[in-house]
Image: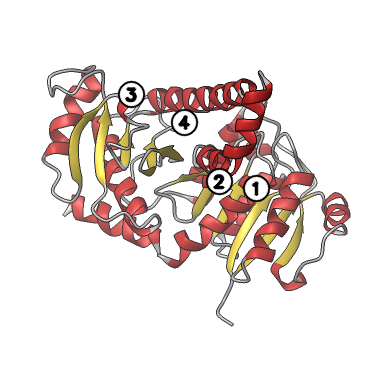
Amino acid sequence: MAEFVNVAVDAMGGDNAPSEIVKGAIDAVNENNRVKVYLTGKEEIINRELAQYTYNKEQVEVVNATEVIDTAEPPVMAVRRKKNSSIVKALLLVKDGTCDAYVSAGSTGATLVGGQVIVGRIKGVERPPLAPLIPTEKGCALLIDCGANVDARPSHLVQFAKMGSVYMENVMGVKNPKVGIVNIGAEEEKGNALVKETFPLLKNCPDIHFIGSIEARDIPAGYADVVVCEAFVGNVILKMYEGVGGILIKKVKEGMMTSLRSKIGALLVKPALKNTLKAFDLEQYGGAPMLGLKGLVVKTHGSSKAVEIKNSILQCITFTEQNINQKIKEKITMEED
């Protein structure tokens, strides 16, 4: 059998750790025999969780880590002081080459800091962005950046567009992905100083398919495959997506229970409706990769359940097998030549 894709998983991070994290890891290895998971955290607790499941023992390894970084802790200080934490131990496995990728539902700040300080950036990458997939009418789009770089510069956004294009083409199979920059109108002269300065740079970038500005209402329609913005805007878009999606699903379900007729109708449309709503479930897309690092770092929601952890682990397989980091490196190097 070919070598495993090795994924370090922070078993102690997130609201539902360690039970949902371990379950997601086991679901991943049971679904795909090409992945091996290294669970970092308190060994006795993880082993207690693992005892509930049947799985190939060659695909799971426990790495003891006695400390946990809480979300409220200052990230830089926590990463420096808690060398034996589940987050730092997992990131070190990527740094030393034992693992190809890292997945965590724990502290976002510690993951972002650790990703840059421990794993390190690809040469030429100015700022690694967080880039989650979000559902659209046509499938999905990559939102880049959604949380790593609030004060981005135009050159950062150009690199985001390039890295996002590499990801969508090679991981998601979208040929010549369309790139749009988030703006308050379609006209080139609109926008704040950052957007106005970035627009012509993207327009004159030969190795991306830039389609111009995209308004927030056009994102769900799938106008662009790569949605470029700085992290403040991106995070607002992501959280609005999650909030509106949750409310819509709730209201649809409530509406179907209002009368006997609606309940009968609900039974008839339930299979089709379930498939439709599933397309707008963010959990199925896994976590947000932090692009531009020497190894793959994936951050999932703090409230992640097993299905999101599983999908985050499985997305690491394609990322690694498609050699995305090397392709990003080549794309960024082209820009410097």
Vertical position of residue 222 compared to residue 183: above or below? below
- Residue 241 lies left or right of residue 53; in this view the side is left
- Residue 143 lies left or right of residue 260; in this view the side is left
Q: Residue at x 75, y 38 (%)?
A: 16
Q: Residue at x 28, y 38 (%)?
A: 224
- The residue tagged 2 is 284
- The residue tagged 4 is 147
Q: Residue furthest bottom?
A: 1
Instruction: Kindly report the distance in space between the C-alpha atoms of the residues bearing marks 3 and 1.
Output: 28 Å
The type of residue carrying mark 1 is: Val
Helix, strand, or loop for circle 4? loop
| Nearest to N terminus: mark 4 or mark 2 | 4
The type of residue carrying mark 2 is: Gln
| Nearest to N terminus: mark 4 or mark 1 | 4
Q: Residue furthest front?
A: 261
Q: Which mark is residue 217?
A: 3
| Nearest to N terminus: mark 4 or mark 3 | 4
Vertical position of residue 185 compared to residue 202: above or below? above
The type of residue carrying mark 3 is: Arg
